[in-house]
Amino acid sequence: MMKHKVIIDTDPGIDDTMAIAYAIAHPDIDLIALTTIFGNVSVEESTQNALSLLDYFGQQADVAQGETRPLVMEPKPHSYFVHGRNGLGEVEIPKSARSAVDLSAAEYLIEKTKEMPGEIDICAVGPLTNLARALEIDPTIAERVKTVSVMGGAVYRPGNVSPVAEANIWNDPDAAEKVFAASWPVVLAPLDVTTKVVLSPHFFADLEEADPKVGKLLSDMARFYARFYRSHSGINGCIPHDVMALAYLTIPGVYMQKRGALATVTKGPGIGQTIFNPAGKPTVDPMWGERPQHIALLDIDAGFFAAHYFDTIARRSPTEIGD
Ligand code: BDR
Ligand code: CA
C-alpha cells in the first residue's frame, strides 16, 4: 500500500503533539512536514515546538513557519490556560538546533503540491490561515491536494469558546470560510466527533508503561491537559481532538460521515460558527446548493479509536491488547 504523504498544519499544542506522535508512529503515514500557525501559542512558539518535538521523536521532517495573525480580524489571546505556558503542558523538552525552511507555510504547501500533485494530504489542526493564504496566492493548489482534513467547528452541538464557535475556526473565521468555499476535498472533524473520545489518566499510565519515551511524554502532557478538562468540563481525562482529523486517513471506517456544504459565520455574535447543510437537503437560499460538497465526521467508534491510538503509539499489534 502507498503511504499517505501528510503535511500537518499545526499550533502545538498538547493534542497537536498527540497527532504528530501518531503520524510518526503509524506505518501507513509518511510525515513530509509540519507547517506552523498561531493559535494555542504564537507562531514562533509553534515553530520552536514543532522542531523540538520532531527532534524528540527522532524525525527529520521539514518545518515551515506560517502566518502570525488572522487574515482580517484582530488576533485573539493564545490558549496558554489550556496548553500551558509553552504549549506543551509545561513539560520541558530539549530545544532544537534546527531551523524552519526558507519558505512560508503557504509557499511550502504550494511548492510541495507542485512537486507531488494529487499525492499530498494536508491535515490542518489549528486556525486555517495558512491554507487560506495558500489559496489566495495560488488558487490552483485546490486541484493538487488529495485531502484537506481539518479539526474544527461544532456542527450539531455547542462550541467550546462561545455558544456556537470552536477555537480553531473562531481564531480565524475568514480563513475557515475561504477553505470551506474552495473546491478541494475537505473532511471536517468537528467537536461533534472529537468530544466522543476521552482518554483517561489510566490510559496514559498504561501508555507510559508501554512506551517510556513517547508514551511518557504524552502522559506528562496529558496530566496538564486533564487538569483543564476537570476544572472546565468536569471530565476525567482529556480529548485528543487533533488526532481525529488525522486518523481519518488511516481508519476512515470508524467514523460516521456525512456529505454536505460547510460555511462559517464571519461577523456578529455567531462569529466562528460552522454551518453544515447535508447534501440533497433543499434550501430556499440557492447559495447552499452552489457551494462545494465536503464531508463532516459526526460520530466515531470511540472504544476502537482509543485502543487503536494506544497500539499505534506503543507500536503493538491489536492482538496484544490485554496482555
Ligand atoms: C482545538 O483547539 C486547540 O486548542 C486544540 O489544539 C484543537 O486543535 C480544539 O478546539
Ligand atoms: Ca491544535
Image (spheres, rainbow, N blue to C red):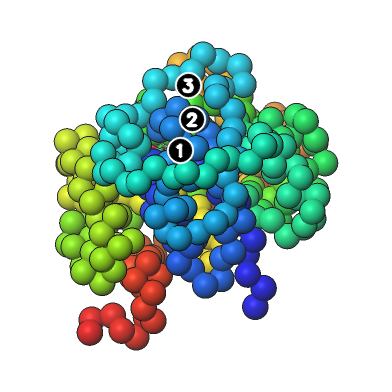
Question: Can you identify the residue that label 3 sits on?
Answer: 270
What amino acid is at disc 2?
Glu
Q: Is residue 265 above or below residue 263?
A: above
- What residue is shown at x 33% (from left), y 68% (from top)? 310
What is the x, y in percent for residue 163? 37, 27
Q: Quadrant of the C terminus?
A: bottom left
Q: Name the mark on residue 44.
A: 2
Q: Is residue 56 above or below residue 175?
A: below
Residue 47 relative to residue 197: left or right: right
- What residue is shown at x 42% (from left), y 59% (from top)? 57
Q: Earlier in the sequence, mark 1 or mark 3?
A: 1
Task: Specify the quadrant of the image occupied by residue 28.
Answer: bottom right
Q: Secondary structure at mark 3?
A: loop
Question: Can you identify the residue that label 1 sits on?
Answer: 48
Disc 2 and disc 3: Cα gap in Å?
30 Å
Disc 1 and disc 2: Cα gap in Å?
6 Å
Contact flag, marks 1 and 2 (Cβ < 8 Å)? yes
